[in-house]
Amino acid sequence: MLEQPDAADLLATARAALLEKLLPALPAHLHYEARMVANAMAIAGRAGAADPAPLEARLANFAESPAHFAARIRAGAYQPGTPAYAGAAALLREMVRLRCAVTNPRALG
């Protein structure tokens, strides 16, 4: 077991220092870049906390890999009215939800 603070805590502390202390001291022409770094730190923290394992296990029920799942979608294997449509649609919704939770949680509502 790792000691505290963990990686997420360190990222959050570093991000807060960047936004609260360093950003105001930077010249205005560097503010955009500093905010980009802060956003990347927030995304990295959320990505580290996300657990894709349950979703990956569900995906394995449909295909051997995400690429194979995509190929089966393109081939029409999950068209409306097919037996696997509801499960594939639910899986895709969960995949998008996880991606948004990491990269843009505000998009979730």
Image: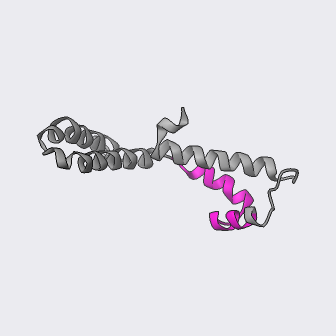
Outermost residue, front side: 29
Q: Which residues are magenta?
A: 51-72
What secondary structure prevails in the magenta region?
Answer: helix
Camera-nearest residue between 49 and 23: 23
> Residue sitting at 58 percent across and 43 percent down?
97
Outermost residue, top side: 109
Look at the picture and state if 20 lies above or below 40. above
Q: Residue 22: image x %, image y %?
A: 15, 41
Is 71 within the magenta? yes
What's the colour scheme? one colour
> Residue sitting at 74 percent across and 65 percent down?
74
> Residue sitting at 24 percent across and 37 percent down?
16
Task: Answer with the quarter of the image where residue 108 lies.
Answer: top right
The answer to whether 90 appears left or right of 44 in the picture is right
Look at the picture and state if 91 lies above or below 72. above
> Residue sitting at 42 percent across and 44 percent down?
46
Q: Residue 102: image x %, image y %?
A: 47, 45
Total marks in image: 0
Camera-nearest residue between 5 and 88: 88
Task: Answer with the quarter of the image where residue 19 lies.
Answer: top left
The answer to whether 87 appears left or right of 42 in the picture is right
Please state, as top left, top right, bottom left or bottom right, where the C terminus lies in the image: top right
Q: Residue 34: image x %, image y %?
A: 24, 47
Is 88 within the magenta? no
